[in-house]
Image (cartoon, rainbow, N blue to C red):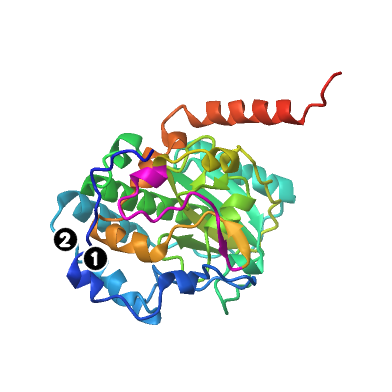
């Protein structure tokens, strides 16, 4: 039985509803399509005029403009994004691929960011029609303050998301500057307006975790309570391996985020999206509530994996269960 939800029923603001384009965001995302194809930009465009839902993206920024939490977080993020990266040195430093990756992973333990991984660039990391010269994607993850994100859908949770996007941006610029000071071209990519690069696929491939029912990555260490940034480079980093903490198995039998979602945008089973069965958040249902509540984040906050100290224990328990299921029976 579904849990009681204090945010249902949700009725979207008519002013926002009037801005929706004729084309469905779910259609842009490829919901129900049987053939693989590149993703198309549906939201968070660097230039909102480039996408059908651009008026809604602009409307998002009209919400809670005087809230002190939001205002301070946006101002700090703007300052970070405006800061330059280091100039490119003339001489290229030389390291083995493994040494480059080890140096990058060590940076994650210094406090500027919590998660790091490396993926080799693939065409499906880019939106339709996009190309990039870089061969490596350095992924960065920064964890939310759990007490702050747990306030969702209050504006202080939205401010926490903005703060962590700013922190992720600062980390990406720091890593890009480190590479450029050693003679390697490097380009920081910060969320949420990442342009042509999709952040979730390379984050999964480099070992951050697996896609959860709520459409966010779940890691064993931080659950879904973190934000992403990336650095694109040609420096010869060794890729880091993907990890399976057991998220798929868990999400099949868990309804917590599904029941908590005010607009009922989460499905009990996977959906076909551009030829692939995957967890999918219905864009046309999610966006109105998301826009009216500074990004919402309820599903991230209630996810059992997100509670500090829980995820690693869950992953160990699920690993033991899989091991028992795979063991041969003794007659």
Query: Residue 255's x, y, as percent?
Result: 44, 41
Q: Main secondary structure of the magenta part?
A: loop
Q: State which quadrant residue 88 falls in.
A: bottom right
Check contact, mark 1 vs mark 2: CB within 8 A: yes
**Extreme-top residue of the structure:** 331
Q: SS of the residue at dot 1?
A: loop
Q: SS of the residue at dot 2?
A: loop
* 128, above or below 317, in the image: below
Left or right of 163? Residue 218 is: right
- Residue range highlighted in magenta: 257-274
> In front here: 141 or 299?
299
Q: Is residue 255 visible?
A: yes
Query: Residue 302's x, y, as percent?
Result: 37, 39
Q: Quadrant of the N terminus?
A: top left
Query: Residue 150's x, y, as percent?
Result: 31, 38
Query: What residue is pinned by disc 2?
Result: 65
Query: What residue is pinned by disc 1?
Result: 61
In the rendered image, residue 20 lying in the magenta stretch gets the answer: no
**Extreme-left residue of the structure:** 66
* 147, above or below 98, in the image: above
Residue visible at 29% across and 76% down? 55
> In front here: 236 or 2?
2
Specify few, some or many for label 1: CA neighbours under 10 Å numbering under 14, 14-19, or 20 or more.
few
């Amino acid at each position: 039985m579904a849990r009681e939800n204090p945010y249902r029923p949700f009725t979207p603001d008519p002013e926002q509803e009037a801005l929706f384009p004729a084309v469905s965001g779910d259609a842009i995302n490829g919901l129900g399509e049987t053939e693989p194809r590149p993703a198309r930009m549906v939201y968070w465009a660097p230039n909102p005029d480039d996408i059908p839902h651009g008026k809604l993206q602009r409307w998002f920024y009209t919400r809670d403009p005087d809230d002190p939490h939001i205002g301070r977080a946006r101002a700090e993020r703007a300052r970070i994004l405006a800061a330059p990266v280091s100039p490119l040195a003339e001489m290229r430093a030389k390291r083995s691929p493994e040494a480059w990756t080890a140096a990058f992973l060590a940076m994650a333990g210094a406090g500027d960011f919590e998660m790091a991984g490396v993926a080799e660039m693939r065409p499906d990391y880019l939106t339709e029609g996009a190309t990039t010269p870089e061969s490596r994607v350095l992924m960065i993850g920064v964890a939310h303050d759990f007490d702050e994100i747990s306030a969702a859908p209050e504006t202080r949770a939205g401010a926490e998301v903005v703060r962590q996007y700013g922190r992720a941006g600062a980390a990406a610029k720091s890593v890009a500057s480190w590479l450029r000071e050693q003679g390697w071209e490097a380009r920081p990519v910060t969320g949420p307006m990442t342009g042509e690069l999709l952040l979730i696929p390379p984050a999964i491939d480099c070992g951050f975790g697996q896609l959860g029912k709520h459409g966010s990555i779940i890691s064993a260490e931080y659950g879904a309570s973190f934000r992403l940034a990336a650095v694109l480079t040609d420096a010869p980093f060794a890729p880091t391996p993907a990890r399976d903490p057991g998220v798929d198995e868990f999400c099949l039998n868990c309804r917590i985020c599904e029941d908590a979602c005010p607009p009922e945008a989460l499905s009990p089973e996977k959906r076909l999206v551009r030829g692939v069965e995957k967890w999918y958040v219905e864009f046309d249902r999610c966006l109105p509530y998301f826009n009216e509540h500074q990004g919402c984040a309820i599903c991230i906050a209630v996810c059992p994996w997100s509670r500090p100290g829980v995820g690693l224990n869950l992953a160990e328990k699920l690993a033991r269960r899989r091991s028992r299921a795979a063991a041969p029976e003794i007659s």
